[in-house]
Structures are given as C-alpha cells and as structure tokens.
Amino acid sequence: MNQLPVFFGVLKYEFRMQIRRPALWITMVLLAVLITGAGGAFRELLTYQISSISLVEMVVRWTVRMNFIFPVGVGVLLADRLPRDRRTRVEELFWSMPGALSARMMGKFFGSMLAALIPLLVFYVIGTGCILYHTQDLMTLPLALAAFAVIVLPGMLFISAFSIACPAILWVPLYQFLFTGYWFWGNMLGPRVGIPTLSETILTPAGGYMAAGFFGVPAFQIFDFRVTALQGMESLSLLLGITGLVMVVLWCFLKWQQARQ
Amino acid sequence: MDKPTGDDRQLLRRIAGGDRQAFTQLYVRYQRLLFNYLLQLTPDYGLAEELLQDTLVAVWKNAGSFGDRSSVQTWLIGVARRQAHNTLRQRKIPLANEPDRAVPGGAVHRFCRVLRAAPTSPIELTIKYGGKMSLDRLRYEVQLMGRRVILTPVLVMASFALLAELLNYLHTNPARTLSAGLELILPIAAGVVVATVISHDPAIELQLTLPRQYHQTGLLRVFLIAAWTTCIALLTSGIIVALNLGFMPQPPQTLPASLQFLMGQLVWLAPLLWLSGFGFCLALLLRSRSASAALLGGIWVVEIIFKDVLAYYAWLRPALLFPTTLLPLVGRLPQVYFDIWLDTRLEVLATGLVLCLIGWLLLRNPEGLLKGASEE
C-alpha cells in the first residue's frame, strides 16, 4: 500500500486539529508579549542605529530571539499529542486501519509541529517586516528566510521529536516541566555555575553554533567568534540526525507496544 | 422523595419513552438516596460516584423494564445494587456493610427511612462523621490524583541528590545545585501539577451535581499538592542544613537557630506558593493543561533570563522568584543583602497568596469548568 496518502492525510488532520486549538494561539501570543517586553522589541527593531549594526546582525539577533522561550511553548504544546489518542480512545481504531504506523507517526509529527510553528512564523514575519521597513533593504527577506531555516528549524525539529516521543513513556506534566528545565539547562546555563551542561556543545538546539558559524553573530552561550561554518553544519546535522533517531526509536516502541496488545 | 408513588411510575414511563426532562426530575428526587446507599456498599467516595453514574445510565436504558411489582424506590435501589455488585466483582473489591438482602423490599424500605433521617449537607456530614469523614475525603482525593502527583516531587529531589553526588565526585561544591533544585525546579513542578489537576477533572459533570461545593474540592486538591511538596522540601532542606550545604544569605546570628532555619525555608516556599497560585489561576482562566504548562514554563525561563531587570526595578520585585540561586551575594554587605532578600521573599509570598485567592474566586464558576472540559 502506498503510504504517502496516509502520511499527508494524517499530516493534514493533525495540522488542522492543532491550528484550531485556542490553547496554541493563547500560549504563543502571551509568550510573544513576554519575550518582546509587551512590544518593546519591535520598537527596538525600528530604532536601531543602522550605521552601528549590520543587516545580518540585526536579522540574526531577531531570529535568535525566537529561540528564547517559544521552543518551550512548542515543546509543551506537542507533548499531549500522542497521549491524546489514548485518552480519546482512538488509538486502537488507528491501529486497526490499513495505514502503516510509520506514516501515521510522521504525519502526526510534521502536522502538529508545523501548526505550532505558524503563530511563531507570524510573529517572526512581523519583526522581519519592521526590519525591512527600517532598513529599506530587500536583502532582509532572503536573509531572514535563511536565518529561520538554519537557526530556528533544526532546534524545533529536535525538540518536537522528543516532545512527541517522550510522553509515550512519561507522564505528560512530568515531561512538560522537565522539558522546561532542560531548555534552560541545555541552552542558557553558563559554564561558570559549575554544573555540567550541554549549552556550549554542538548539541545545543537553541542555534548558537549556526548563528555564530554561518552568520558570525554569537548567541546564547556560544560567544566564540572563531566558530566555523563547519561547526555550524556539524551542529545542524547532529540535531537533524538525533531527530530522525528519536522518531525511529518511537516507531520501534509503538510497534512493540502494539504487538503486546 | 415524598412524592406519590404513582407520580414516580409516570416519570419512569416517560423516561422509557425518551423524555429527558422526566429523567432529570427522577434524578433530582433520588440521586442523594442512591448515592448514600452506594456509600454503604463501598467506602470509596470516588467509586460510589462512578457507581451512581452507572446506575443512572442503567435506569435510562432500562426504564421500560420496570414492571410495577415494586415501588420505584425499591426498583432503583435494586438497579444500584446490581451495578455495584457487577463492578465490585469485576474489580475484585469486597462488598462492605450491604443492607439486609433477605427481604429485599422491606429491608430497602427500612434502609431508606434511615437514610431520610441521615445528614445530607456537607456541613451535617462533617459534623456526623467528624475526622473520619475528612480522612476519607483526603484519601479519596489523593487516590483520584494518582501516584504520579505524589511521586513527582520525590523524583525531582532524588534526581538532584544524585546530581549533587556526581558534582561532589567531580570536586565541585553542590550547594548551589541543591539550592536550584529547591528554589527553581520543585516550585515549577508543583505549578505544572496544580495546573494539570485543576484544569482537568474527568468526572467534572458529576462533581458539579454532588451536594458538596466544587470550589472546596478544587482548593483541597491545590492544598494537598502544596502540602506534599512542602513536606518533601522541608525534608530536603533539613538534610541540606545537616550536611552544611546551605546556599542562602546568612541571617543575623543573633536570631535563634530555629528562626534561622524557618527563614531559610523562604528560599523555596515563596516561589512554590507563587507558581502554584499562578498555575491555579492559569488553569482556570485558560481551561487548558497544555497552555497553562507552556505559560508557566515561559514565565520560568523569562524569570531566569531577565533576573537582573526584575531585581533592578522595585515594582517588579514581587515577581522576582529565584534570587537565592541566581543573584548570590556580589559586592554587598551580608546584612544589607539579607534584608533585601528577605523583603523580596515576603513580597513574593504575599503575591502568591493573592494569586491563590484569585484562583479560589475563579473556581466558583462551574459553567466555565464545564466549558473547558471539552476543549482540550
């Protein structure tokens, strides 16, 4: 059986279900209010001294801002997608259908993640529009697109995979607050505190290596200007590779669970 | 309940014909009697509620089978007893204190007479059952929330103890890490758990039909979570002090040791109350577990990133949650630092209490609770 229609069908269904969720919009709007200091960040974008900061730096700084607290919202909102099927008692119904588990799982992953990214994208476009208006430079658009693709997306894929997979074995609220703690510990905790952390390694999903390696703008705990594009590529590949690995492990686990029933 | 039997029979006939209004009338008339009867069969409050629901479903489905051989009351008690027997047998739970079954009709009538004289309001029930009833309620609420609510704070602090051990092995002082566990992690865990428990009750429709007030139930649940987290935090704090691993501003040495210890508990108590109260309010305002947890997480990260801004502006300090771990003594006199620290802890504690009060007021809106039940 061709699994592509199953994949796209599930993707469309999950996307619609997530995008119509009031919780998604309320959360993202309130997080946007928090991270912009009730709109102060937009004023900042419109008042930058153009002579003192390059366009690249302006765009990358704005892009990096997306990775402060939005990933927490995305991760927490995706965490209940898999347990929801069990709670609403449709899981067994899905299992009895002809579509492959892998196609349904990937459809769920991409559908719910894309929907969760829509409010973030709207917010990002508004900020990019402010930069474009202020600088009057059309290069803003491809630059913003590239920055979003390499700084925000890999990290989002990474955390989305964990947020879909981990609640298969963890209680959702437990995962949610552990994930919040992880986001701080693995991305923002400095080495001076003395606690071993991943925030300086290429496994940091906040995108510091990509920002520094591809655009030369240090971000989060990656202050080193000598970070190369190769290191940025390594970080990006590692994040994508782990995303794939997590989904494979989830597939094996669900298969095993299905066989036990 | 004292309506003529003929009237009840008419109601059952209308129910058999699918009349919902008649069903509501019968329910209003008999729910208390049936619930009290079921409580005689099982001491488990939650299970009795579940059995009442099953009984009502069975009455709705089988009203047509009522054969006029007994009174409606006797028939209803019979249905409730069958439901209880089936469910308890399936779950292998022994039946407790079942009323005399030898002469069903007569015994049931005698039983009903006793029940009519029994206290029915929450206040009367509390007076009648005293401490036993309260303990039953507490046990029931803990069972309902589940082991996960109990285990979560235990696991959090156990993980931090292991991390501290690892740091000690790596020759790093674990004091600040343990403080982070108490001040940063335990309160956010409690906040998320409060938001989860308050925003979702699988039996909310039934809860709202019961004689007891739901806002009392909600408040009791928040209290239980906060109290359990407090026990774990106190225990951990005691161990930390005993191991001389405390990480907090030094209180004046002139104060008694016990008062110094109590002041030290403000490290975790203030953010615990604040985040629990905030989670309580968010859950009731947003009616969504995920949105509440996401916003609590967002606030938590913002508190860490913008700690200096929060500390700088005096009007933001009542929301400065984690100064002990994040803003340690730097370039200030210990006494001055302790005074500032104590002021902010008390301010956070006060705003936490206000948040809990707002949550309690929000809980008095049962329609909102019902609306939220279907939106996740």
Image (tube, grey):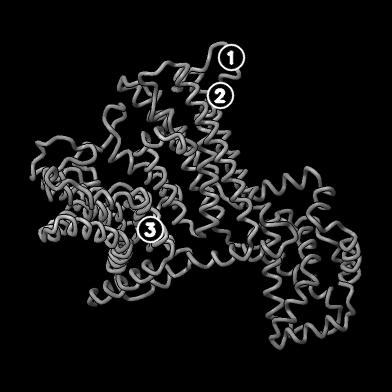
**Identity of the residue furthest to the bottom in this view:** B17
Res A198 → quadrant: top left
- Residue A255 visible in rendering: yes
Residue denoted by label 2 = B263
3D distance between C-alphas at marks 1 and 3: 47 Å
Residue B255: give its label.
1
- Residue B158 visible in rendering: no
Amino acid on which the number 3 mark rests in the picture: Val
Q: Dot 2 surroundings within 10 Å: few (below 14), some, or many (20 or more)?
A: some
Residue B89 percent location from the top left of the image? 67, 62
Does the residue at mark 2 contact the one at mark 3 (Cβ under 8 Å)? no
Residue A29: give its label.
3
Residue A32 percent location from the top left of the image? 35, 54
Amino acid on which the number 1 mark rests in the picture: Leu
Which circle, 2 or 3, is nearer the viewer? 3
3D distance between C-alphas at marks 2 and 3: 38 Å
Left or right placement of residue B356 versus residue A66 in this view = right
Residue B12: give its label.
none
Q: Nearer the viewer, residue A153 or A111?
A: A153
Question: In terms of secondary structure, where does tag 1 sit?
Answer: loop
Left or right placement of residue A119 versus residue B314 in this view = left
